[in-house]
Image (cartoon, rainbow, N blue to C red):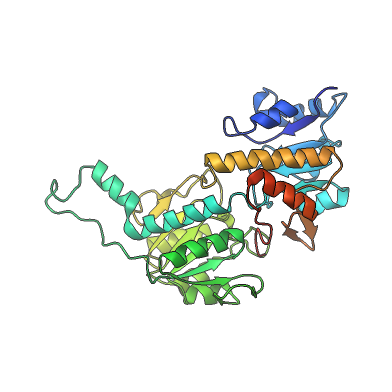
Amino acid sequence: MSSPPVLLLCRLFPGTFTDVAHRFRLLDFYASALPIHAFLAAVAAHADPPRVVLVFGGGPIPVGAELLDAVPSLRCIITVSAGTNHIDLRECARRGVQVANAGGIYSTDVADYAVGLLLDVLRHVSAGDRFVRRGLCPEQRGGDFLPLGSKIGGRRVGIIGLGSIGSAIARRLEAFGCVVSYHNRRQREDVAYAYFPTATDLAASSDVLVVACALTAETRRIVDRGVLDALGERGVVVNVARGASVDEAELVRALAEGRVAGAGLEVFDDEPNVPPELWAMDNVVLTPHQAIFTPESMADLSRVVLANLDAFFAGEPLLTRVKHRGGIPNPLPDCVPAVYDAIESVFQKTIDHSLTWCW
């Protein structure tokens, strides 16, 4: 019996899906010379068309009605991201198409990265690197110095989105002596951090604002001019969520006018495009949406995708199923306790399924 076909509409880090490729027949758009619509038409015309597609944000076609119309055989969408803002969950639910994401496997790496960005902005690490490479050390250029850096200990850090990633960031920053507070759609009863009902209230009581929420209609541009002004001229913004969670044009203006002190940005509104005004700002750290790229996360991703594929073709519940409820994605895995035990045996840890996001 031939391997089941799986449509592949995402670029893969080299070597990521070796196990998946051994078990399934990958129909890879990026290995084809055809334009996307011609490729999908050819795929749909196969005698055994694919029932599953692997996707990522920023792919070659919107993941919704257009894709599902082009390949009507699709019954399952697996995104290799934690976020699902690139998928029309309502349309998938209407058609009975299942959706799965990467679950909470990226939480640790993204949390580490967020702390690294904050340290870099506060202590001018990247700016110092550029300073040295330009031959501008004080001993060489008659006493030129970078601006003074700032301690991280004692900083008031406000986190927008205290899900698994936000919680991991909070724990790390507590170890540095930071005072953590947060804003969610609703207050959590299982944490002692101060809660603020609006992002503006949170910013007004923070020195640092970390954006770690899912991108939904509710959180799009949640960091706007009002929030930035509340944060103030000594405030720092760190965004490891989605570029559209921040009003990028307002952030650029606030940085240029000195209304905000600095920013660490891992994501952008129109990736891979970055506002050129940011390029020359030494108080801004820019990175290319790479927080999840570690060997450990890639290995975990391969196992999660393989487990979801096995579950789908066996007619069992997906391990990291995403449900559509009232316009807000619910990222809780829809699986029974026995499946959680299976996940734990594979990963030698429990996937954090309590809250991938709190929105």
346 or 251: nearer the viewer: 346
| Residue 80 shows in the view | no
Give the residue at x 71% y 26%.
22
Q: Quadrant of residue 313?
A: top right
Q: Tell how many labels.
A: 0
Q: Quadrant of residue 188?
A: bottom right
- Residue 131 in the image: above or below residue 9: below
Give the residue at x 36% y 60%.
122
- Residue 342 in the image: above or below residue 16: below
- Residue 115 in the image: above or below residue 13: below
Q: Quadrant of residue 200?
A: bottom right
Horizontal side, residue 186 vs residue 52: left or right? left
| Residue 155 shows in the view | yes
- Residue 281 in the image: above or below residue 1: below
Horizontal side, residue 301 vs residue 246: left or right? right
Residue 164 location, x and y as percent? 61, 60
Horizontal side, residue 328 vs residue 161: left or right? right
Residue 166 location, x and y as percent? 56, 62
264 or 65: nearer the viewer: 264
Residue 127 location, x and y as percent? 31, 51
Residue 211 location, x and y as percent? 54, 61
- Pick the quarter of the image with the N terminus: top right
- Pick the quarter of the image with the C terminus: bottom right
Give the residue at x 43% y 49%.
286
Horizontal side, residue 125 vs residue 333: left or right? left
261 or 344: nearer the viewer: 344
